[in-house]
Image (cartoon, helix red, strand yellow):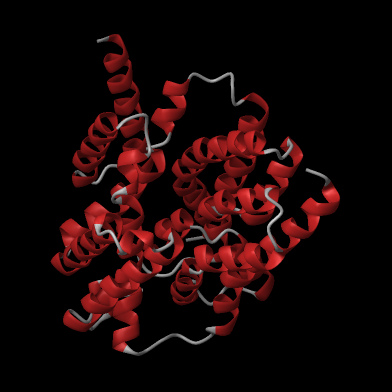
């Protein structure tokens, strides 16, 4: 793709993406006191992550079985409050082992 | 916490995001090249946007010669959830933040950075945020160029295994919070149920994924906030 047509795309894309991120940070200056808004903001991160994880995680690997094994490993370790890095690495390792076994069978 | 220990705490918390990003960006690099962009163009997109879903949607629009308006609209919808996150982060940042620091941190407000920052107890300072966003940004950029240049060299099974890293990290953030607080658990279960509904119910599954995240998250958080308002900071309000 030529840069003459690429660069306008790049510029527009970067501007829109940055605008949605930076405007709320600049516009909301005071500490919010409203109980409903505070509660909403407390729940929102967990809701976003849950929506993004299910069901997408089950198609994130080579097949749904290895993904399920990875999810199971992550769930167990997360229940024991292990670090983010350990949970992520263990789930990846579990997926790798599962897919190697499945190839071998 | 002093500046330095604050920075290193953020740095440590950012590493799993970095590894997750390496793999996701790697996949993006492969995708961008196979779509007809060159390695530098793929890298420029990653370095100036840092948004997985947005970038995946943008490349086909670019190579098919779509209008700038179409590109802008798609990015707006897919990335609108970052606005919610920025509102939440505006409450999480402590008073030490100056304008340039906010401008810089805003550039790397991603799902993962947001999730880790909001799971910290109390407020976060600018040095924590710098530590937190540094390696994810590098991982996103380096992963893209690696995928673009060497995508065909890595065995498929390794790429596949790395694909779950980001989601495992989400699980590691959500589950402990849901175990500790049944109100949060309720919100999580509701969000998952809505997400499944949007995936499997015929008419709802036509809604673009950027909208699905916003609709489900806003609905679940609103219902949870109405049913179980959080009264004091002790209960974990931001």
Residue that sits furthest to the front in the current view: B203
Please state the horizontal and vertical placement of residue B135, each as a whole percent of the image: 57, 44
- Comparing A86 with B147, the one in front is B147
Residue that sits furthest to the right in the current view: A4
Please state the horizontal and vertical placement of residue A97, each as a whole percent of the image: 30, 20
Residue positioned 32% across, 14% down in the render: A103
Residue positioned 59% across, 49% down in the render: B134
Residue positioned 27% across, 15% down in the render: A101
Determine which quarter of the picture holds residue B225. Answer: bottom left
Is B103 located above or below residue B131 in the figure? below
Question: Number of callouts in the render?
Answer: 0
Please state the horizontal and vertical placement of residue B230, each as a whole percent of the image: 23, 80
Residue B1 appears in the rendering: yes
* Side of B71 where A56 appears, left or right: left
Residue that sits furthest to the left in the current view: B182
Residue positioned 19% across, 43% down in the render: A80
Residue B120 appears in the rendering: no
Is B24 located above or below residue B85 in the figure? above
* Side of A71 where A28 appears, left or right: right
Q: In which quadrant is the C terminus of chain B drawn?
A: bottom left
Determine which quarter of the picture holds residue A15. Answer: bottom right
- Comparing B11 with A15, the one in front is A15
Residue that sits furthest to the top in the current view: A104
Please state the horizontal and vertical placement of residue A57, each as a whole percent of the image: 33, 43
């Amino acid at each position: 793709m030529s840069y003459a047509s690429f660069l306008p795309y790049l510029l527009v894309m970067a501007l829109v993406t940055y605008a949605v991120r930076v405007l709320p940070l600049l516009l909301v200056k005071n500490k919010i006191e409203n109980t409903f808004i505070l509660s909403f903001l407390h729940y929102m991160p967990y809701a976003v992550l849950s929506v993004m994880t299910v069901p997408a995680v089950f198609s994130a690997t080579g097949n749904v079985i290895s993904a399920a094994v990875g999810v199971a490993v992550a769930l167990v370790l997360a229940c024991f409050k292990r670090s983010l890095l350990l949970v992520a690495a263990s789930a990846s390792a579990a997926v790798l082992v599962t897919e190697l076994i499945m190839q071998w069978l | 916490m002093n500046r330095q220990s604050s920075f290193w705490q953020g740095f440590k918390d950012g590493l799993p995001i970095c590894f997750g990003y390496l793999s996701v960006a790697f996949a993006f690099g492969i995708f961008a090249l196979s779509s007809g962009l060159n390695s530098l163009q793929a890298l420029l997109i990653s370095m100036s946007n840092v948004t997985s879903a947005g970038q995946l949607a943008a490349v086909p629009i670019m190579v098919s010669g779509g209008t700038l308006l179409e590109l802008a609209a798609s990015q707006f919808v897919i990335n609108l959830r970052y606005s919610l996150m920025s509102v939440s982060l505006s409450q999480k940042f402590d008073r030490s933040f100056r304008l340039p620091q906010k401008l810089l941190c805003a550039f790397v407000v991603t799902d993962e950075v947001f999730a880790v920052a909001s799971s910290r107890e109390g407020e976060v300072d600018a040095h924590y945020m710098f530590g937190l966003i540094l390696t994810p940004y590098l991982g996103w950029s380096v992963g893209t160029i690696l995928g673009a240049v060497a995508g065909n060299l890595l065995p498929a099974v390794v790429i596949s295994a790395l694909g779950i890293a980001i989601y495992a990290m989400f699980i590691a953030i959500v589950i402990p919070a849901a175990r500790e607080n049944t109100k949060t658990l309720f919100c999580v279960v509701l969000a998952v149920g809505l997400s499944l509904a949007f995936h499997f119910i015929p008419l709802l599954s036509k809604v673009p994924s950027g909208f699905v995240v916003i609709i489900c998250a806003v609905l679940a958080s609103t219902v949870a906030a109405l049913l179980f308002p959080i009264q004091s900071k002790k209960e974990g309000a931001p």
